[in-house]
Every structure is written in structure tokens, then in C-alpha cells.
Amino acid sequence: MSEPSVYAGAALRRLRRREGLTQAGMAQRLSISASYLNLLERNQRPVTARVVLELVDQFDFDPRTLQENSAIGGIDGLARRLGDARFADLGIDRAEVTEFLAAAPQAAAAFARLFDERGGASLQETAFEEEVWRAIERWRNHFADLDEAAERLAEELRLVRADIGAALTDRLRERHDLAIRFLPRAVMPEANRRLDLHARQVQLSEMLAPDTRNFEIAQQVAALEYRDMIAGIADGAKFDHPGAREAFTAYLRGYFARALLMPYSRFLRACEATGYDPEVLARRFATSRGEVARRFTTLQRTNQRGLPFFLGRIDPGVQLAERLLGASDASLLDRRPACPLLRLDRSADWRVQPVMMESGALGPGHWLIAHASAPAMADEARRDVLILGLEARFAESFALARGISLRAEDATPIGTGCRTCRRTACPARSLHGPAPSGVE
């Protein structure tokens, strides 16, 4: 997939005014026409690489300011804040969010800061997990340094499907003088892995499936050899909840483990060759469908991008237990998917459903949703529902979409939940009362 275009009209206007230049004067310095500069400032054209080079050369310009909105998560981050239930009656759509961010990025950043500190849910009201998810989303779930380090290590170990576990076990023994030992469930009733430095052992529960064993060993390698790199990323995030930093750090160790077991370039080639088939890829890389689905959401390397999937996980209590939005613009997982027309079940096989979000919903409307059961990350005896989502316009090359109509008129119309849904003709609403007042 191609690199996304950068529209930075507000940043160019501020620079021009700071320099005291007219559009004609600045256009001359940049070797472009005044009319073209006018289009750039009105966000009707993206800033090209040549213009960026001229800005750097002529004005000692920091090109990172062209993407100054990344600190608030860009359009997606702002859209999620404006999608709060308290703003539901305003009918703010994605076009308005885009216009707000393009026309007044600093005002948008001020709103986001105020929302996060006061206007959003308070520290007591914000779910612990939500704070960690937001930290992941600020990076769009792509940690380039970890990916590159894991790929180098995979090449060094020459990991192939037949001997992943053996290679990782040898690494721990040769580099760290650590042996692998499997312990009975009675000894490790609640833990999957434990490091016992006194006994020089990485202790694993005997109840772990073979693919989970490899994942746990890879996480141990991450903790031992890439602790400083992971800590550096975690230090860049700001958390209010006690323990949130530790949870984010644990997520980064898991990210590294996936990147080690499914090295970026090799995994992306396999995705493209198989049509992103999660079952084939799970067997090929000796891992689980859940870990493959999580890896799908990370494929955002510059000039080597995968399809923009998102992933959600619903626990047996019908609560949202995990959210990885990746590079998607999904608003479906802003909260627990509550639409009764979204047919989620715990089938062992993948079930596929094209859906169309209600009119005015933030983010794209037409999606392909695939869902299947999978073991919970911390308790393999518990079965959760994985939700793997992809915008319908990208789904033609997705293996699970074969035989499924991707026409908008064939999609199931869904909403974010009956209390806030704007659809009036939905039969599922009968149990929940009429549509909210003031909406069509």
C-alpha cells in the first residue's frame, strides 16, 4: 500500500506568517506558483517531497511539524474523542473532524489535551485497559525499532517452522545460561512463565500449547535482551493509572515476540501469497490464529505496508478485552460492539459478515468483519471471540472474503448500540425503545 498523503495547510500558513511573506513571496522561495501554494494552504493538494526539501533548505524547517497532529492520534484519535457519547446529539461526522484538524490543528490539539485531562472520562472512570490501548494507538501499533530488531534476530537464529522452539531454547542456554523446564499446573496454577535465576531456569506451565510455549520463550528473550529498547518506548508514553506502564511494557514484549516468530518481510510475503489466510499462516509460522490476527494489525512499515486490519477480542462476559486498531480508521470498537445485528458467536470456524455502519458514524462505513473463537491470552481454558475487521474496499484480496458479496447494498446495517443508534427502521430496536430524539 502507498504512503498516506500529508496535508499541512495550517503549518504552511503559520510558517509564511512567521516569516512575514505573502503567498507570492513564499511561492517564489519554494520555486512553485502562488496558485499552487494557495491550494497547499487550503489542503486541496498534499505536500510533496520536493516542497518539503525546499522548506528545509529555504526556512530551516523541521518537517516533523507537517505531522504535528500525530501526538493526538491524527484524524483517528480526534475522531474517537469526538465520538464520545456526550457528543452523540451533535452528529459530528468524519468530514467535519478532518476539516477541524486541517484548518486548526493546534486548536484540535488543545481540545484533545483538555478532553484527555478533563473532558474525557476521569482517571477514576477511564478503564485501565483503555489507557494502555490509547498508548498503543498513538503508535498505530507499529513499533519500527522492535520490528527491525526482531527481524535481525530471526535472521541470526535462522528461524524456520521446524525448529523455532529449539532455536529459542538454544539461545537462552548459550547466551544466558538458562534452561527450559515445564512444571505441573499444581505448581504454576495461574502463571504461564516464570524466570528462576537461582535455578537458572525459565519455567513454563505444562498446560501450554506448543505454539504458546514458543511465544512465551520469545517473550523471555525480549525481556532479557531488549529490555532497554522496550523501556525507551515505554518512557515516551504518559500514564495516569498505577501499573499502566507495566502493562504497556508487557504488551511491547509480546509485540517483539510476534515480530520474532513472524519476521516482518517474510510474514508480509506469506500474507500476500495466501490472501492473508489466518489459518494457513498460523500453521506456516507455528503459531495461533489469534497471534496471526494481532500481527496483521502491525504491518505498516514504510514502503512495505500490509492491509489495514483491526482486531478486537470479546470475553465471555461480553466485554471488550482487547483492541488493536492498527492503521484502520475503525470506530466500531470505541466501546463494546453492542449492535444485536452484529452476529458474534464462539464458533470454531471463521464467520464472515459484511456490515454497514449507520449514517454519520465516524470512520468508514463499509466493513468486512470476520470472527471466531480463540483461547484467552492469559487463560487458554477460556474461549473469547476474536473480531478481525477490514474495510470492504480492501477485502477483495482477503481469503476469508471469498464468496462473500462486497456490495454496499448487501451489507448488514448496524449501529453502535440501540441507545445511540440513529436508525429508525431497525426491528432490533423494539426491545430498547425509539431512536434518540433529534435524529432521523
Image (cartoon, rainbow, N blue to C red):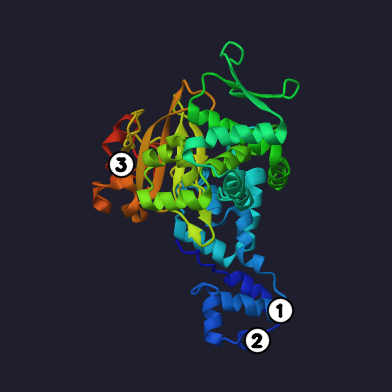
| Mark 1, secondary structure of its residue | helix
Which residue bears the numbered disc 2?
Answer: 29
Q: What amino acid is labelled 3 in the image?
A: Gln
| Sequence-first disc among 3 and 2 | 2
| Residues marked 1 and 2 touching at CB (< 8 Å) | yes
| Mark 2, secondary structure of its residue | helix
Q: Quadrant of the N terminus?
A: bottom left
Q: What amino acid is labelled 1 in the image?
A: Phe
Q: Is residue 27 left or right of residue 426?
A: right
389, 2: nearer the viewer? 2
Kindly identify the residue that appears in the image at 69 percent across and 80 percent down. 57
Which residue bears the numbered disc 1?
Answer: 59
Question: What is the distance, in whole Å, between disc 3 and disc 2 at their CAs?
Answer: 53 Å
Can you name the residue that lies furthest to the right here?
198
Establish if 129 lies above or below 145.
above
Which residue bears the numbered disc 3?
Answer: 353
Q: What amino acid is labelled 2 in the image?
A: Arg
